[in-house]
């Protein structure tokens, strides 16, 4: 079966200019070619007429969780809930992400391996949702940020729990190295792992062809992560210029997560009742804007994630633009660059021949105004319509 998609404009996501009066040919869920409508005929099994709207790659959330909703407060206690409860709590979050145009997500730790089971359910067609990359249980020290049920202290426990995650089907490892914004009892630059423990996780991941993603805001913990080759640095709110230089030199990644700090439905909605968290977040907002303005100058590998702010990946892109990025850079950070960060670039992230036909339909051009990402009409995965929004 062949499907021709016609659009007012097609944003390929490769850095090329928008294709006005564009067309995309799909066969068996994959893109055959992309060009102008004048290059194609009419003899196709199906023609999708989007000639008054825009088509671009499906969005990729490079950092989120399934069961967590920051607005409900105490995210760690949410992770501790029974597995059957958190599977059910994950379902509306998955649908919010899909409705916003997210077709792939990288999950940063869930207890009881529920992320692995939900990934299987989506792959088997039992559930509609974004394509998932999963990490299983977070690797976290007993006194660290992110402690739920599972802890890993010392090299031996780090290795054991890393191997258990991979045995269950994890795609990568999530390591909690520094303090976090929602932890009242630690600073965001406190370091909870030794360099040797971090190295152990990296070695275990690389042995099976995988990698480590580390929650690391700054300070000594971020130094250790860069030194040991942690592939993706999550958050990096306090990253210094010296650390940026080393990160760029080693070709590592930063994954920005802004909505949880800046959006009123994030930490602000619930945990501001704790003075220590409120003060930390307000201070972090100022630092984050300054930090990422500097990050953009160094041009590191950069992608974005919502950190459980389900459906707000477009808002993440808006934040990046407010820090000084162009609309093009912001779109790449949630499409092609995010695919590269997640090691999915051979499958998704851009509309190119041979890739899966994951795409979204937008009312207006997001290259002209990044806020246009808020108006997703339709979401397709592998050429199949998986969600439609009522557009007023």
Image (cartoon, helix red, strand yellow):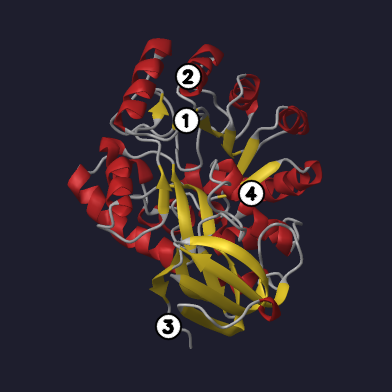
User: Considering only vertical position in the picture, is 81 above or below 48?
Assistant: above
Query: Are discs 3 and 4 less than 8 Å apart at CB?
Result: no
Q: Earlier in the sequence, mark 2 or mark 3?
A: 2
Quadrant position of residue 218: top right
Q: Nearer the viewer, residue 18 or 72?
A: 18
Q: Earlier in the sequence, mark 4 or mark 2?
A: 2
Q: CA distance from mark 3 to mark 1?
A: 40 Å
Comparing labels 2 and 3, the label whose residue is closer to the camera: 2
Q: CA distance from mark 3 to mark 4?
A: 29 Å
The residue shown at (50%, 78%) is 44
Q: Tell me the residue that label 1 is attached to.
A: 176
Q: CA distance from mark 2 to mark 3?
A: 47 Å
Q: Tell me the residue that label 2 is attached to.
A: 207
The residue shown at (71%, 27%) is 250
Q: Work out whether residue 79 can be spotted.
A: no
Q: Tell me the residue that label 3 is attached to.
A: 390
Q: CA distance from mark 4 to mark 1?
A: 23 Å
Q: Earlier in the sequence, mark 4 or mark 1?
A: 1
- Crowding at label 2, few (<14), some or many (≥20) Cα neighbours within 10 Å? few
Q: Tell me the residue that label 4 is attached to.
A: 337
- Per the rendering, the mark at residue 359 is none
Of helix, strand and loop, which one carries label 4?
helix
Comparing labels 4 and 1, the label whose residue is closer to the camera: 4
């Amino acid at each position: 079966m062949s499907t021709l998609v016609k659009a007012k404009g097609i944003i390929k996501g490769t850095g090329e200019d928008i294709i006005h009066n564009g067309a995309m040919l799909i066969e068996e869920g994959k893109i055959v070619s992309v060009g102008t409508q004048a290059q194609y005929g009419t003899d196709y099994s199906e023609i999708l007429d989007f000639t008054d709207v825009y088509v671009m790659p499906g969005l990729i959330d490079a950092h989120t969780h399934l069961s967590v909703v920051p607005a409900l407060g105490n995210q760690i206690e949410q992770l501790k809930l029974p597995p059957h409860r958190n599977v059910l709590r994950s379902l509306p979050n998955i649908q919010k992400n899909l409705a916003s145009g997210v077709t792939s997500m990288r999950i940063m730790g869930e207890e009881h391996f529920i992320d692995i089971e939900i990934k299987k359910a989506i792959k088997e067609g039992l559930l509609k949702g974004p394509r998932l990359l999963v990490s299983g249980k977070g690797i976290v020290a007993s006194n660290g940020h992110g402690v739920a049920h599972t802890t890993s202290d010392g090299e031996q426990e780090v290795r054991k729990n890393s191997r258990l995650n991979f045995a269950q089907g994890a795609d990568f490892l999530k390591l909690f190295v520094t303090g976090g914004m929602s932890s009242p009892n630690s600073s965001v630059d406190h370091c909870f792992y030794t360099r040797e423990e971090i190295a152990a996780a990296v070695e275990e991941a690389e042995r099976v062809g995988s990698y480590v993603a580390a929650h690391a805001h700054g300070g000594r913990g971020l130094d250790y992560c860069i030194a040991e080759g942690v592939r993706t640095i999550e958050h990096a709110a306090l990253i210094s210029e010296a650390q940026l230089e080393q990160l760029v030199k080693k070709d590592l990644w930063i994954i920005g997560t802004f909505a949880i700090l800046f959006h009123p439905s994030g930490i602000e909605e619930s945990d501001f009742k704790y003075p220590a968290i409120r003060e930390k977040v307000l201070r972090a907002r100022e630092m984050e804007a300054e930090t990422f303005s500097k990050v953009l100058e160094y041009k590191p590998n950069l992608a974005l994630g919502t950190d459980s702010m389900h459906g707000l990946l477009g808002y993440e892109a808006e934040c990046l633009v407010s820090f000084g990025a162009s609309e093009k850079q912001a779109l790449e950070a949630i499409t092609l660059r995010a695919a590269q960060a997640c090691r999915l670039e051979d499958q998704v992230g851009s509309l190119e021949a041979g890739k899966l036909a994951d795409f979204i339909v937008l009312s207006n051009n997001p290259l002209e105004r990044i806020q246009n990402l808020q108006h997703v009409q339709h979401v397709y995965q592998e050429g199949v319509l998986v969600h439609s929004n009522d557009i007023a």
